[in-house]
Image (cartoon, helix red, strand yellow):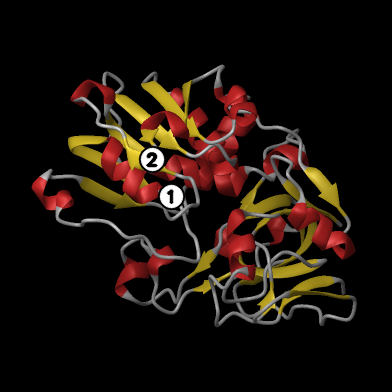
Amino acid sequence: MKALYYNGSSAQYKEDAPMPVCEPGQSLIKILLANICNTDREILKGYRQDFRGIMGHEFVGEVVESPDQELVGKIVVGELNEGCGNCIYCRSGREKHCLSRKVIGMSKDGCFAEYMSLATHLIHPVPEGMRAEQAIFTEPLAAALEITKQVHIDPAMNAAVIGDGRLAYMIAQVLALTGIDLTVIGKHEEKLASFSPFAKTKLLKDYYEGEDLCDLTADECFEYVVEASGSESGFPLAMHLVRKMGTIILKSTYAGTANLNMSMIPVNEITVVGSRCGPFEPALKLLSEGKVSFPDVELYELKDYEKAFASHAFKAGFRF
């Protein structure tokens, strides 16, 4: 089968990849659409140096084999993290933190291929009538919704999202649904323009005087700051923007390190929340009801993966 394989340093297009073999409790899925995530780009930069296998984790597919016969023939999306089912994390509803978990496209073969196997309990049917082109946004939208699952957002306060990319766009739409006073901070005026229907916008450079961050009053700071820039400079900026006793939510994953004065976290009693994968059913509901919307995906054939990864579209991906 056709597949995009990561060999430890680069991606390789193959047409002779072996078909996946389902283990007990797994289903076989024929991939229809698969999107490139920023995490996939970070893998190519060395984010998961121990990974060797088929890339990709955002997909829409059709179940062709399953121990649950009701799923066969259904159009589905699926979660990333398959735990062992026995450890304290799995038993307490924290499967995505299982120490021996398998993560599609990062520690086990993913969805940049014609077929993929996945634990059946991680599969979610797409609502009737929803186009695959809509459903493909379920996984990243679920990651945005994880913020509201982890943190009580007081709509009487204010919030900032650092970043003007794809994930920031999804997070901003989710936060805007709470009615909170929302500001999105980014580098690119043309990207920020797309946020204007549901958020205020500010350019990153407005917070700097030369290479130093500007002094801010408490009123100019934010109760909640979501760092979704994908940049090493995002966390230090979040620390500068957050109010004392405020909350920082970290969404960025990148192959790098950040330098900052950690003493300011206890001194200012800042809450820092790491946030990644989230709930799929609410994401599917928001998409099906049209509560959130995103630009069309720019789709490529798998063999044209270099063009897809280089694309500047809101989202690029593959059609099978």
Instruction: Say left or right for 161 vs 87.
Output: right
> Camera-side residue: 16 or 273?
273
Where does the N terminus fall, quadrant-wise?
A: bottom right
Please report the residue visible at 64 percent of the width from the left and 69 percent of the height from the top.
44
Q: Residue 214's mark?
A: none
Judging from the image, what secondary structure is the residue with disc 2 in?
A: strand
Q: Is 7 above or below relative to 178?
A: below
Q: Which residue is mark 1?
A: 251
- Residue 128, position as x, y percentages in the image: 72, 36
User: Any mark on residue 226, and which?
Assistant: 2
Q: Nearer the viewer, residue 208 or 150?
A: 208
Extreme residue toward the front, this view: 210
Mark 1, secondary structure of its residue: loop
| Image quarter of the C terminus | bottom right
- Of the residues shown, which amino acid type is indicated by label 2? Val
Q: Amino acid at mark 1?
A: Lys
Q: CA distance from mark 1 to mark 2?
A: 7 Å
